[in-house]
Image: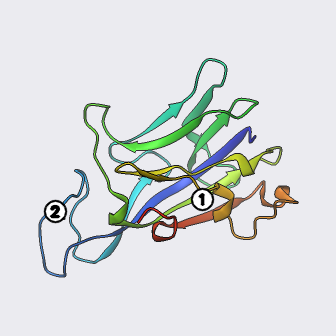
Amino acid sequence: MPKRIFLALLSFLLATSLSAGQTGPAKGRGRGVAPASDPLRYLVAYDSALQGDWSVTTWEDPDHLVTVHPNAPAPGRSGNALEVQFSQNGWGAFGLANMLDWNDVHYMYLNEYKTIEFDLYIEPDATGMENLYLLLDDAGYSNEPQLVSYIAGWDSVHPEASTGRWIPVSIDLTQVGLF
């Protein structure tokens, strides 16, 4: 399992339900998302630091720690990145949540977004990348595709070919089986 991975510039491409010239929040939209006059725009969750009310959450237990450093130096590039370290056996998870705390969650619905985009850096000594899953959950419907299925040119025989460099990842939410 990967010992460390880094994420940088995490954004969501909004597909708003506003028509040109219409004002006001889109129906069902979570707080913290301003209306747009253009039908597509980006909502940035992380760009060298967590943006707005975005926060990091982890799922772990005392024997399987997951450590997240939200302001780690980005390897080989300027700025910071989210550094995630998994325990040796790799159990555990981390996520980003748009919330102040568990009593003030900014609900977001996947049908309001077109893509999730981020840059991924995998440490050269990482193993088990095929065991990383992207959990997408929306109102009780979920899908858990393998993260490597979104890495262009991923070679399961030679996964080391994708390590030690930044990889742009773009996930088309209409193609993950939630809608």
Q: What SS does tag 1 mark?
A: strand
Identify the residue position indicated by label 2 in the image.
25
Nearer to us in this view, 167 or 152:
152
The residue sitting at 59% across, 22% down in the picture is 61
The residue sitting at 27% across, 78% down in the picture is 38
Picture quarter with the N terminus: top right
Q: Position of residue 172 (x, y in %)?
A: 50, 69
Q: Position of residue 135 (x, y in %)?
A: 52, 49
Using the image, tell me which numbered label, if any, was put on residue 119: 1
Badge 2 or badge 1: first in the primary sequence = 2
Mark in the foreground, 2 or 1: 2
**Residue 48 appears left or right of 100:** right
Q: Are marks 2 and 1 in contact (CB under 8 Å)?
A: no
| Number of other residues with Cα within 10 Å of mark 2, as a class: few under 14, some 14 to 19, many 20 or more | some
Nearer to us in this view, 173 or 87:
173
The answer to whether residue 36 is above or below residue 51 is below
The answer to whether residue 40 is above or below residue 34 is below
Nearer to us in this view, 111 or 85:
111
Q: Amino acid at mark 2?
A: Pro
